[in-house]
Image (cartoon, rainbow, N blue to C red):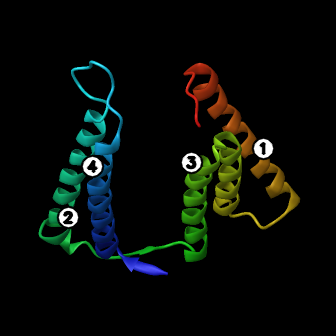
Amino acid sequence: MEISKRKLSLAVDGILIVLSVGYFVLSFFIEEGANFSLSSSFYPRLLAILIFVLSLISLYADTLGSRKTETGTVKVGNPGKQGGILLTTILFVLAWQMLGVFYPMVFVTTGVLVWLYNQEPKSMKKLIKTLLVAAAFTLFVILLFGIGLKIEFT
């Protein structure tokens, strides 16, 4: 499937604008810290505002600016794989939040994403590589967040 560069850029701008608004709204639900001059929701709000403003600038540049004359197409990957990636991400967040199984879901999600992104044909070698990458990444996450930073994911 191919899409023009201009349409793709406009779509990305629109998605980022919607996400930044949602991110800004969600920042009001962050629990406030104790006795800090800046609350814990300050940086998420700042990031949401920056994303929004930069997306508006990009949208302006795409519609009226110098990139308006940009031509060509971009090949968009397999929609089935993209849907699988989106579904995997949603299931990761749901399983983590509802079941509290963060590290096992990191392993499963990483494995599925590596499997979908890997262009090799299905084989035992691809499966072993996928499992090794998923295990290594999960170990990295455990060492960094669980042991190094002592962050508990519940």
In percent of width and height, residue 78 lies at 57, 74
Instruction: Residue type at mark 3: give it.
Output: Gln
Please indicate whether residue 142 sits to the left or right of residue 23 in the image.
right
Q: Residue extending furthest left? A: 64
First in sequence: mark 3 vs mark 1: 3
| Residue 27 image position (x, y, % from top left) | 31, 44
Q: Earlier in the sequence, mark 2 or mark 4?
A: 4
Circle nearer the viewer, 4 or 3: 3
10 Å crowding of disc 1: few (<14), some (14-19), many (20+): some
Q: Nearer the viewer, residue 30 or 83?
A: 30
Query: What is the crowding at mark 4: few (fewer than 14 residues within 10 Å), some, or many (at least 20)?
Result: many
Q: Residue at x 64, y 56 (%)?
A: 113
Element assignment for label 2: helix
Instruction: Find residue 59 and name its label.
Output: 2
Are dots 1 and 4 in contact, CB under 8 Å? Answer: no
Mark 1 lies on residue: 132
Q: In the rendered structure, which amino acid carries the disc numbered 1?
A: Leu
Q: Given contact means CB atoms under 8 Å apart, are the residues at marks 3 and 1 in contact?
A: no
Counting every numbered tag in the picture gives: 4
Question: Which label is found at residue 24?
Answer: 4
> Splitting the image into 4 quarters, where does residue 6 fall?
bottom left
Q: CA distance from mark 2 to mark 3?
A: 34 Å
- Asked which secondary structure carries label 4, the reply is helix
Q: Amino acid at mark 2?
A: Leu
User: Of the residues under marks 4 and 3, which one precedes in the sequence?
Assistant: 4
**Residue labelled with disc 3:** 97
Q: Secondary structure at mark 1?
A: helix
Which residue is painted at 70% across and 33% down in the image?
139
